[in-house]
Amino acid sequence: MLTKRIIPCLDVKDGRTVKGTKFVDLRDAGDPVELASRYSDEGADELVFLDISASREGRKTFLAVVERVARAIQIPFTVGGGISVVDDVLRALDAGADKVSLNTAIVEQPEFLQAASSAVGSQSIVAAIDAKRKGSSWSVWTKGGSEESPLDAIAWAQEAVRRGAGELLITSMDADGTKEGYDLDLLRTISQCTSVPVIASGGAGTKEHIKDAITIGKADAVLAASIFHYQQISIADIKEFLQTNNIPVRI
Amino acid sequence: MIGIIDYGAGNIRSVGNALDRLGQQYFVSNNIAELQRAGKLILPGVGEARSAMESLGQIGLLRWLTNVTVPFLGICIGMQILFDHSDERDTACLGVVPGRISRFDDTKLKVPHIGWNRVNVTATSPLFSKIRDNEFFYFVHSFRASVGPNTIGMTEYGEAFSAAVQKQNFYGVQFHAEKSGDAGIQVLKNFIELC
């Protein structure tokens, strides 16, 4: 039986891991390669690295980090942040990443999603959607959560799959950084109306939150950052808890 | 020395990193004269069957590949193209292993099949030496081979499919051994030392 995945996420700025609340207030959380090795040893199923550097220098540093990570760990990982042309995708995969996560660029140019997917296959393409509640639905935000787009998150998720996304990374901007739980309605709605795996993101604070994202939110994988970085809950604890709740995990 | 076949569509870096970890010498090439000197061959793979076959055709390796006599390991797409045919863009494959590659049913399952799943070892093979039964390996694929006479390991996703096959000197694994932690490294070590 396919297991549910636990995915620590590392935001990387100028070569260092950082973590903020609601996309702002960044704090240093350590060396990405060291953290990656630690998470891999602790039983992480995959890792995600998001480059939030603003400068060209920062981006170069990030590719070097990707290469170091690929040499250090033997589990799959996804990289994202500022990927906007097919060459960026190829560079990330050549550096040793398994998947790329695409966000702002595919909202602005949806045809880039097809181009990326035909170049490397949909299994390497993750469509990342930052969603924020707006009345009874959710709108899509871009540029690290700073700009609202005209897109509806549910409709965009379906279109992203049609255009070749092999996986969806759904971040609730309302929940992100609060540690009050994932947006379960958002997750369940998207998971039930699309045919690809859904990764839940934003809001994890307890083991129960992670279980709920899977059982109620119907997520196939759960992503979290701060609860892992500051060692509030270990990956092993979460997996043991999920297993006692009859959720298949890799232990 | 191990030769990694470079056909422009593989995760060569990851396989190379895994071999580095094992302290194994290897070279990467798309040249028959060079590849013929390899004691073992690895065909890595991501992407899709049609473009993999086209790339191998463009560099003139198709006929040579089917006649390779040294131990050969195909990973993911590298395993799938060992079969007769893939439904992925209706592609004729190498025909080393009998059978057809077809798509998972996405009306019933999330496709691609992404993540860690168990492999039930169904036949004695050096490839699975020192691997516990039902060990976890990492998969990412939308197409799969049914269970058949060449299956040496199978995995359940909606139904059982071939996670690993062997025919004479040709070995294939659907999972990414190079990304499957310690168990994956052990499979690569087995291929290098025992196959």
Image (cartoon, rainbow, N blue to C red):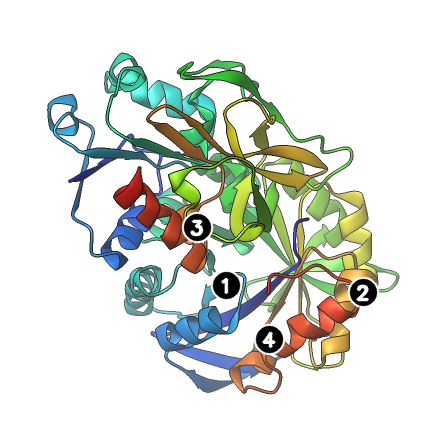
**Which residue is denoted by mark 3 in the rendering?**
A98
Q: Mark 4 and mark 2: span between their CA atoms?
A: 23 Å
Q: Residue at x 37, y 77 (%)?
A: A34
Which is closer to the viewer, label 3 or label 4?
4
**Which residue is denoted by mark 2 in the rendering?**
A184
Residue A111 falls in image quadrant: top right
Residue type for callout 2: Leu
**Which residue is denoted by mark 1 in the rendering?**
A48
**Which residue is denoted by mark 4 in the rendering?**
A236
Residue B38, given in percent of the width and then of the height, sits at 16, 32
Residue type for callout 4: Ala
Q: Earlier in the sequence, mark 4 or mark 2?
A: 2
> Can you see residue B118?
yes
Which is closer to the viewer, label 1 or label 4?
4
Which is closer to the viewer, label 4 or label 2?
4
Q: Mark 3 and mark 2: span between their CA atoms?
A: 28 Å
> Can you see residue A174?
no
Q: Are marks 4 and 2 on the same chain?
A: yes
Q: Are marks 3 and 1 on the same chain?
A: yes
Q: Are marks 1 and 4 on the same chain?
A: yes
Q: Mark 3 and mark 1: span between their CA atoms?
A: 10 Å
Q: Is residue A152 above or below residue A244?
A: above
Q: Residues within 10 Å of mark 2 (few under 14, many from 20)?
A: many
| Residue at the limit of the structure toward the front, as seen here | B124
Q: Earlier in the sequence, mark 1 or mark 4?
A: 1
Q: Residues within 10 Å of mark 3 (few under 14, many from 20)?
A: many
- Asked if the residue under mark 2 is in contact with the one under mark 4, i.e. CB atoms within 8 Å, the reply is no
Element marked by disc 1:
strand
